[in-house]
Image (spheres, rainbow, N blue to C red):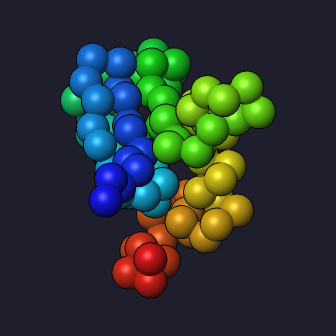
Amino acid sequence: MIHEQWIFKDGASQFPCASFPYAFRQMYNAIKSGVEKGRKYNDMVKQMVIISPQKDQHGDPRRYNYTSATELAKSSGLLAPNGEINSREFKRR
């Protein structure tokens, strides 16, 4: 049985993930560590994308840029109101 994977791309590398929550956490952590290392936030978010195993209406994999991924994470409870990762929600998934 083939498991469909989500892919997080940071511009230079890609990381397979089992689900959207884990792909989003990879994105969130990459931005956080990049900012701590002095990289420019806007430059980083332009390069990052999460690719879904689900197809869009054209048959292509759905792609989530940083903004759309963040909105999906907020609506599904993965981000707390303060903008931090909601670890309790990750434990439930």
Above-or-below relation of 3 to 35: below
- For this view, does 62 lie left or right of residue 48? right
Tell how many labels: 0
Measured as percent of width and height from the top left, residue 25 is found at: 39, 53
Measured as percent of width and height from the top left, residue 89 is found at: 48, 77
> Looking at this view, is 75 or 18 the one in front?
18
Picture residue at 38% right of the left edge, 48% below the top: 5
Residue extending farthest to the right is: 57
Measured as percent of width and height from the top left, residue 19 is found at: 42, 58
> Looking at this view, is 20 or 44 the one in front?
20
Q: Quadrant of residue 1?
A: bottom left
Residue 67 visible from this viewpoint: no
Picture residue at 65% right of the left edge, 59% below the top: 74
Residue extending farthest to the front is: 1
Above-or-below relation of 4 to 37: below
- For this view, does 45 lie left or right of residue 35? right
> Looking at this view, is 24 or 59 the one in front?
59
Residue 24 visible from this viewpoint: yes
Measured as percent of width and height from the top left, residue 7 is found at: 38, 39
- For this view, does 78 lie left or right of residue 72? left
Picture residue at 66% right of the left edge, 29% below the top: 59
- The quadrant in which the C terminus is found is bottom left
Picture residue at 38% right of the left edge, 81% below the top: 91
Above-or-below relation of 55 to 79: above
